[in-house]
Image (cartoon, rainbow, N blue to C red):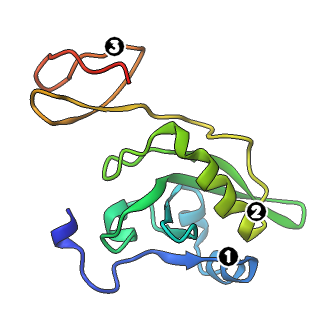
């Protein structure tokens, strides 16, 4: 996927409350009804893009500290994070990347939950090298049937 990233494909850098305020007013009601693609770059800064954006494109092809999907809702006089997950098949971030997400959201001044509202566990198959999303503790590759590592 990295080879398909073009200059300018990156998501919007959101390093402050003012950055978020400027970005959120550009979003349509329809956009706000769906989660957005997010990532936290190695600089610790949040980046946001439309949901159908690939995380690798949102990152401009760079490595990240975390990635996933995020939703916002307006409560009283402020925006809050209503849902956040680590669902990114481009990066497959571990659930342990949550503190990076929390720091980036705190830096922007967004109220957030104490952890991911939906955690996704990924495993790469040692035999076929495909990425798998683990469901119901079934550690078998959906592509080739091989056993997947527990960690």
Query: What label sits on residue 87 in the rendered view?
Result: none
In x, y percent, where is residue 77? Answer: 89, 67
In which quarter of the view is residue 70 placed?
bottom right
In this view, the residue in front, 31 or 44, is: 44
Q: Above or below — where is 145 with respect to 25?
A: above
Q: Are marks 2 and 3 in contact (CB under 8 Å)?
A: no
* Mark 2 burial class by Cα count in 10 Å: few <14, some 14-19, many 20+: some
Q: Earlier in the sequence, mark 1 or mark 3?
A: 1
Q: Residue at x 45, y 74 (%)?
A: 11
Q: Are marks 2 and 1 in contact (CB under 8 Å)?
A: yes
Q: Above or below — where is 61 with respect to 136?
A: below
In which quarter of the view is residue 50 placed?
bottom left
Q: Which residue is mark 1?
A: 20
Separation of disc 2 and disc 3 at Cα? 35 Å
Query: Number of callouts in the render?
Result: 3
Q: Are marks 1 and 3 in contact (CB under 8 Å)?
A: no
Separation of disc 2 and disc 1 at Cα? 9 Å
Q: Residue at x 65, y 63 (%)?
A: 104
> Quadrant location of the C terminus?
top left
Q: Above or below — where is 88 with respect to 15?
A: above
Q: Which residue is mark 2?
A: 110
In this view, the residue in front, 42 or 114, is: 42
In which quarter of the view is residue 61 placed?
bottom left
In x, y percent, where is residue 135? Answer: 39, 21
Query: What label sits on residue 138 in the rendered view?
Result: 3
In this view, the residue in front, 126 or 36, is: 126
Q: Earlier in the sequence, mark 2 or mark 3?
A: 2
> Quadrant location of the N terminus?
bottom left
Separation of disc 1 and disc 3 at Cα? 39 Å
In this view, the residue in front, 33 or 77, is: 77
């Amino acid at each position: 996927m990295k080879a398909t990233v073009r200059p300018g494909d990156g998501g919007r850098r959101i390093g402050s409350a003012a950055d978020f305020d400027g970005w959120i007013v550009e979003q349509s009601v329809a956009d706000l009804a769906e989660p957005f693609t997010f990532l936290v770059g190695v600089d610790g800064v949040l980046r946001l893009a439309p949901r159908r954006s690939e995380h690798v494109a949102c990152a401009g092809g760079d490595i990240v500290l975390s990635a996933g999907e995020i939703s916002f809702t307006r409560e009283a006089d402020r925006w809050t994070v209503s849902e956040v997950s680590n669902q990114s098949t481009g990066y497959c971030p571990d659930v342990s990347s949550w503190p990076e997400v929390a720091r980036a959201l705190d830096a922007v001044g967004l109220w957030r939950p104490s952890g991911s509202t939906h955690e996704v566990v990924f495993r790469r198959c040692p035999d076929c090298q495909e990425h798998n999303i683990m469901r119901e503790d079934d550690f078998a590759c959906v592509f080739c049937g091989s056993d997947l590592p527990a960690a």
